Image: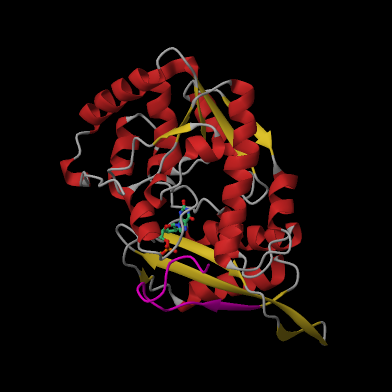
Amino acid sequence: MQEVLEIKSQELNAWEFIKIKSEEISKLVGSGFAINALSGGVDSSAVTMLGYKALGSRLKTYFIDNGIMRQDEPEQIVSIFRGLGVKVEIIDARDKFFAALKGITGPEEKREAITQAFYKDVFANLVRESKAKYLLQGTILTDIDETVAGIKRQHNVFEQLGINPQEEFGYKIIEPLVQLRKDGVRKLAQGLGLPESIFNRMPFPGPALAARVIGEVTPKKIDTVRAATSILEEELKDSGAFQYMAILHNDRATGMRNGKRDFGMQIEIRSWDSVDARRAMPTKLSFDKLSILSNRMVTEVAGVVSVTYNITSKPPSTMEAI
Ligand code: XMP
């Protein structure tokens, strides 16, 4: 396993980092093409801008619509980047991801199904069509730490696990952010001229809303968790929390609606205070805010009869539920 030298956020000189990494990327790719997938998260956004600075139109950027993103996310992100002069193509891969997730219930198996659908199917096709030899990717040091420690297999970590992407998928991966953690990437993203809605964007996991559904992921369950997520994001946008999420449980609970028993769905809310996601404490939300969240979710999200707030710290909890 290759040792990675960390650059701490306070040591990072964004301007110098951009210069060095752009030169490295441009040298590696030469006169060829590279491609990358933009999700709108700060990591993939920083990589997109860095790659764009290094390669210009020799970088092809795609937004893979996997069907498990938040409300209107593909259009919003593509429009932000269009404003910065970066062309992004949306690839509709919703059916492929739902087919890959069908019948799968285990957390690691779900992550693996998403990895395979993303890298082996959708992305491998794009690489083949675009004739790109390189994939630029925003893996950061925390992804590697947690994968190597066996806590969670981050969907984007390969070489550190001894997987050769060239042999497995037919392309080489360039990971320019691998020495940074989230706070360093935010500083870099700001240095790259990205807007605050991106450089201060709340983290959102690669497996997207599939990480927020316990048990099998179906389009219907994703619709439910997406609607709950929209309410949560609207209500907590000024909370100052590091990250918040709505989770759809697999178990049902008895509730009542219109005087009748309703064996309905349960949403768990988590909201975290944290600096770098390695340790986290639940946000001290007011009871009034929690009541608003609960009332809105049971009235606006069809089939939800129970809303809970998780008060565990990380560790021993992790931030995501799966
Ligand atoms: P956990 O759940 O490991 O989350 O405490 C720590 C941070 O990492 C994010 N996370 C992921 N990000 N791919 C990602 O890109 C993943 O598979 C993944 N799993 C967790 C999580 O949202 C939190 O910010």
Q: Nearer the viewer, residue 148 or 51?
A: 148
Residue 220 shown in magenta? no
- Region in magenta: 306-322
Q: Residue at x 40, y 45 (%)?
A: 159
Answer with left or right where residue 62 lies relative to residue 256: left
Name above or below for residue 255 compared with residue 194: below
Majority SS type along the magenta span? loop
Whether residue 321 is visible to the viewer of this picture, yes or no, is yes
Q: Nearer the viewer, residue 159 or 108?
A: 159
Residue 23 percent location from the top left of the image: 29, 20
Q: What is the quadrant of residue 13 in the picture? A: top left
Answer with left or right where residue 181 lies relative to residue 76: left
Answer with left or right where residue 93 lies relative to residue 16: right
| The image quadrant in which ligand 1 is located | bottom left
Which residue is situated farthest in the left direction here?
A: 11
Q: Residue at x 30, y 36 (%)?
A: 188
Residue 102 percent location from the top left of the image: 73, 59
Residue 130 percent location from the top left of the image: 60, 22
Q: Residue at x 68, y 57 (%)?
A: 101
Residue 318 shown in magenta? yes
Which residue is situated farthest in the top direction here?
A: 31
